[in-house]
Image (spheres, rainbow, N blue to C red):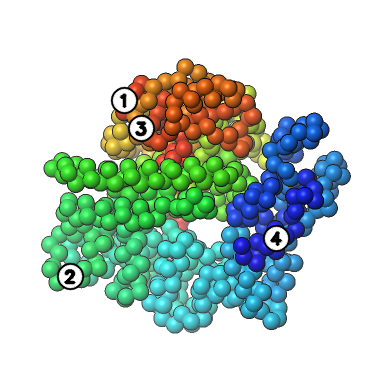
Amino acid sequence: MNQWHQRILGTFTADLSRLWVACDPDGVLLDEKLLSELRARGFEVMGYDDPFGFRAEYEERYRAAWDADEPAPSPALIVHLRHDNANDLPWDIVHNARPAVRLNLAELFPKLAYGAVRQVEPERLGILFDAHQTELQSARGESETKDFILEHVYQLTPRSIRAPVDFWREVLRLHFASRALPEPFAEHVAAILRGRGLLVGHPVAEWLSSRSALLRVVQDAWYRYLEKLKLEVRRMSEPDPPSFGAGEIGMEIEIPFDHTDVRAIIDSMFLDGSLHPLAVSDVPTAMPGWIKAGIVEDVWSQFALAEKGIEALAAAVPEAAAPHKLWGDFAKRYGEMLSRVHELPSKDAGERMVAIRERIKEIQALTDERLQAWIVAGHYADLILQPAIKGPVMVHHVPRFLRQRRSAGEAKVALLVFDGLAFDQWVRIREHLIAGQQPLAFDESTAFAWLPTVTSVSRQALFSGLRPREFDDSLDHTNKEEALWKAYWLNEGVMPGDVMYRRALHQVEQLDALETEIASRKPKVLGLVIDEVDERLHKERSKEDVALWIGRWLDTGFVERLFAFLLGEGFSIYVTADHGNVDAAGIGRPNQGVIAETRGERVRVYRSEPLRAESAAAYPGTLALDVAGLPANFKPLFAGGRSAFVPSGDQVVVHGGVSVEELIVPFVRVSSIAGIG
C-alpha cells in the first residue's frame, strides 16, 4: 500500500463506529483501490446523491438490521457526500455518525495549486502524493504546478520538446499508455510549444487530450506516408485526405514514422486495432519489414495481421483486480479484433480459420473467468459510485453525463440506443460509415451495462438514470421507459415538451415520419431506440451471421441518413447500447425463473434464494450473484461459460450474462468532421 492510501485509510477504523460520513467534494475516496481496501477493512461506501433513493436503501439494508441487533451487509457504512457540508444530511445520520471526515485536495496537497490538482484523475493521485511528499520543498504556483504534475504523473516534460519528432514520440506514448491529458494540462503543453514555434496553428491540445482526434490524424498521415513511398494505396476504411489534421494553416501533418521511437509504437497500434492497415498492392521486396504491420497485401496478410493481433490481445487480458478503465480499454481492443476476424474470408482458409476460432475461445474463457472474479470481489459494485464528469462509467450515468454536456453548451442532445449492440458490431457500423466517405468523427469510449444484461433491466436504467432497485415495479418490461426518461429531464428543469422518446426504429422508411416530427416539435433532448441488432441476433446462430446481416441492413442507408439529419438539426449525437451479445450453446431450460426473453437466455431471475439454489444445483457451472443496486428479492442465476438456458445443443446468439461482450458496451460521440477544431 502506498503513502497516499495509508494517508486516506488511516482515518477509517471499523471498530470505532458503524456509521461514518465522508465530505469529499473532489471524489478522493472513489479511487477503486481505496474502495477495495475499505471493503477489505469492513466498510461499504454509499453515495448520498438522491435523498429518497438513499433513505430507502439505508433503511432496508442497514437501519432495519441495526434496530434488530442483527448483522448488516458490512460492519461499517460510510455515507459519501460529493460536497463539504455534512449538514445537508438528515439529522439522524449526522447524530449517529462519527464526526465527518473531510477529504479536500487543497489540504492534502498544500504545496500545489488546487485548481490544477483537482484535474488529476483519482487513480493517479497516489503518484502525485508520493512526489509531493518527496520532491517539493516550497509551494508552487499554477503554471509550476502543471509542470510538476506533467513530469511526475504523466512522465511528460514539455519544455524538453524541441522538435516535431519529440512531440510525436511523446503524444503517441501517452495515448498508447491510455494517459490522455486532462484539457487544462493539454492547453498548458500547447502554449509552451507555441512559444517555441512548434506546430503553430495546429490543434495540439486536442491531440494531447483526445485519443480519437490523435488517431484520426495519424491514420491520415499514414496514408500519405505510404503514397510518398510510391506504393499503390487503397483505403480500406478511412476517408480521402485532407479530411483530418490540416490545422488552421491548411498544412498537411507529416509524422516521422520511420523514426525508431515512433515506429515501435505505431506497430503496436496497428496490432491492437487502434489504427487500421491500408490495402497495398505490389510491395517491393526492399520495403522495410516494420511497415508491414500497417498494410494488407493479400488475404493471407489479413490472416497474419489478425493472428498477431489475437496474440497481443491474449497478453492484455486484465487481471481480476484491474481498474474498470483497463477493462473498458480491453473491451475496445477485443471488439476491434473480433470485427476484424468476422471480416476474414473463411472460404479456402479452413484449418487456419479453425485455429483462429479456437484461440479466440481460449481468450474468451480466460476473460470470462477473470471478469466474473472481478465482479465477485466487489469491483463492479464500486462503479455505481463513480463520477460521470468525463463520461458515463455505467449506463445509468448516461443521463447525468448528457445533463453536464447541456450545461457545457450542447443545447440539443440526442441519445441513440442501439439495443443489444456489442462493441464489435459498433465497429462494423463505424467502418461502414467511414468506407462510405461519411464526414463523421467518432470519439469512442465504453460504459458498463447493468447485470443481468437484459433489456428490461439495463435499458430502463439507461433512460431513467436510476439503479434497478429504484424501478422495481417495471423490471420485467419496458413500458415505463418513456415516462422515466421524461421524469429525469423534468427533474433537471427541462419541460416535457422539449423531451422526446421513440422506440422500435430500424427501417429507413420510418425516417420520413421521424424527421417530420423532430423538425416540427424541435425537442432539446431526444432519446431513440434502434432495435435492429437485438431483433436480428435472436434469429441467428452465430455472431458472424449477425455481422453479415448488419452489413446488409447498413446498406439501406438508415444509419447515415439518421446521423446526417440529427447533425443538420444541431444535435450532439451520443451512441450507446443497453447490453451486448455472445455466441452460446444451450444447456436446457430451468423450470423456474421470472425473466424469459424471447430466445437465447443467459440468465434466470428468482424472487427467493431457495428457488435459485434449487436451479443452481440442477445446473452445475451456473453462477449465482447478488448484484449491488438490484432489489433484494431479485436474484439472478447466470449461465456458466458461453452457455445459455435454451434447449440442449442449440447454437444461439444471446445476452443477459457475464462477459466482456455483454457487459461492456460502446459509448460514442458522433460529430461532423467539419465541426472539429
**Which residue position is annotated with label 4?**
8
How far apart are the alpha carbons under marks 2 and 3? 44 Å
Q: Residues within 10 Å of mark 3 (few under 14, many from 20)?
A: many
Determine whether, in the image, residue 16 is placed left or right of residue 147: right
How far apart are the alpha carbons under marks 4 and 3? 45 Å
Mark 1 or 4, nearer chain start: 4
The x and y percentages for residue 633 are: 62, 26
| 247 to 395, vertically: above or below | below
The residue drawn where x is 58% and y is 22% is 610
The residue drawn where x is 59% and y is 53% is 32
The x and y percentages for residue 130 are: 62, 71
Secondary element at image label 3: strand
Locate the N terminus and report the quarter of the image it occupies: bottom right
Secondary element at image label 1: loop
How far apart are the alpha carbons under marks 2 and 1? 50 Å
Mark 1 or 3, nearer chain start: 3
Question: Which label belongs to residue 584?
Answer: 3
Secondary element at image label 2: loop
Q: Is residue 586 visible?
A: yes
The x and y percentages for residue 276 are: 30, 56
The x and y percentages for residue 3 are: 65, 67
- Tell me the kind of residue under disc 2: Met
Q: Residues within 10 Å of mark 4 (few under 14, many from 20)?
A: some
- Tell me the kind of residue under disc 4: Ile
The residue drawn where x is 78% and y is 45% is 19
Question: Which label belongs to residue 287?
Answer: 2
Give residue 512's quadrant in the image. Answer: top left
Asked if the residue at tag 3 contacts the one at tag 1, i.e. Cβ–Cβ closer than 8 Å, the answer is no
**Which residue position is annotated with label 1?**
649
